[in-house]
Image (cartoon, grey):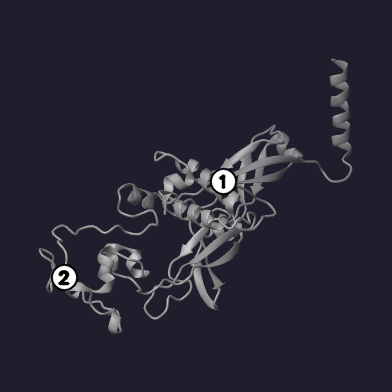
């Protein structure tokens, strides 16, 4: 896996908005639904993995400090004094407590009585997947199961409520999935260990779940912000008054000043979608003046006199 900054094409000092914009651009270009190039799915998955790290404030900090690698896995640390295998213990390193072993004749201790899980932790997935690790360990070892793909369609209300949803994965398994904060349409999240079986001794693959946010009849999504158009009665536009504004958690009331024109936009803070940092975006409500239904003689006469007055001063 390449450096996530290189994958998204952003500098190390990039802000949250720049990272999200770069991810969206790649996701749109390489999503398998729109790009049939065989390599597109690989690029799409790579972009998602990079965004899982850089789009999460805590994971990004861990990566920058070298605590996790480009796939989000912890880096092996704390092996000072370790000087190889020999006898029951490594020189200067106490192996007591590493008692977890895999079953079967081939799943016992490795050189010096060290368990396969411990070797894998040091040498990485190459050993676990049957590749050739240092000194040839791991050749012909257990394999990793295949990743599986699935989609989850959600409403804006479900995103706002950070709901837990049940989804059926390939293979007949049903799992509960919590909608993550800051999710964007088309984002793929990795459900580790929920893919294909890796066999008796191998690790299972992962489930790659693509989130689809369904269109809403009222709201338009703008990042974590929402936009909505609200009808404003003519009398309230002229005199001012209370205006009921729909939100994803129920209508709220706000005051509009007198002589409010059509197209004026008001901000309702914190009424948007959840962000990764736990805060919420805003709701922007734009007014559209609504004329009375049917004939209104008084309004018609007023408008006629206004027009004549303007014509007389022209």
Work out whether 48 lies above or below 166. above
**Extreme residue in the left direction:** 92
* Distance CA(mark 1)–CA(mark 2): 48 Å
Residue depicted at x 64% and y 37%:
265
Report the side of 64 relative to 27 (left or right): left
Q: Label 2 belongs to which residue?
A: 95
- For numbered disc 1, what is the local secondary structure? helix
Residue depicted at x 88% and y 29%:
304
Q: Label 1 belongs to which residue?
A: 25
Report the side of 239 relative to 152 (left or right): right
Q: How far across and how far down the image is residue 242, in percent?
A: 65, 43
Q: How far across and how far down the image is residue 199, in percent?
A: 42, 79
- Whether residue 223 can be seen here: no
Residue depicted at x 25% and y 80%:
108
Using a 10 Å C-alpha cutoff, classify the residue at mark 2 as few (fewer than 14 neighbours), some (14 to 19) or many (20 or more). Answer: some
Q: Foreground residue, 166 or 36?
A: 36
Q: Quadrant of the N terminus?
A: bottom left
Q: Foreground residue, 64 or 130?
A: 130
Q: How many numbered dots are placed on residues in this image?
A: 2
Q: Foreground residue, 166 or 207?
A: 207
Residue depicted at x 51% and y 64%:
208
Residue 186 occupies quadrant: bottom right
């Amino acid at each position: 896996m390449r450096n996530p900054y290189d994958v998204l094409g952003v500098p190390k000092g990039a802000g949250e908005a720049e990272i999200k914009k770069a991810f969206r651009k790649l996701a749109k270009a390489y999503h398998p639904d729109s790009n049939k190039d065989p390599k597109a799915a690989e690029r799409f998955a790579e972009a998602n993995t990079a965004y899982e790290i850089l789009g999460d404030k805590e994971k990004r900090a861990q990566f920058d400090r070298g605590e996790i690698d480009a796939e989000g896995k912890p880096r092996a640390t704390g092996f000072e004094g370790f000087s190889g295998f020999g006898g029951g213990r490594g020189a200067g390193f106490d192996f007591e407590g590493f008692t977890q072993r895999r079953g079967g004749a081939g799943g016992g201790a490795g050189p010096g009585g060290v368990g396969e899980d411990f070797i894998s932790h040091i040498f990485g997935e190459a050993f676990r997947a049957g590749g050739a690790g240092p000194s040839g360990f791991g050749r012909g070892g257990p394999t990793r199961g295949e990743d599986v793909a699935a989609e989850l369609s959600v409403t804006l209300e479900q995103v706002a409520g950070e709901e837990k949803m049940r989804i059926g994965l390939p293979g007949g398994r049903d799992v509960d999935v919590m909608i993550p904060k800051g999710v964007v349409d088309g984002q793929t999240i990795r459900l580790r260990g929920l893919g294909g079986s890796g066999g008796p001794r191998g690790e299972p693959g992962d489930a790659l779940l693509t989130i689809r946010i369904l269109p809403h009849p009222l709201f338009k999504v703008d990042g974590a912000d929402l936009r909505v158009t609200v009808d404003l009665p003519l009398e309230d536009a002229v005199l001012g008054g209370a205006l009921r504004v729909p939100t994803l958690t129920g209508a709220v009331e706000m005051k509009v000043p007198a002589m409010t024109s059509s197209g004026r936009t008001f901000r309702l803070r914190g009424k948007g979608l959840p962000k990764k940092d736990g805060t919420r975006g805003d709701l922007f409500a734009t007014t559209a003046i609504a004329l009375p239904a049917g004939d209104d003689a008084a309004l018609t006469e007023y408008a006629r006199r206004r027009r004549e007055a303007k014509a007389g001063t022209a």
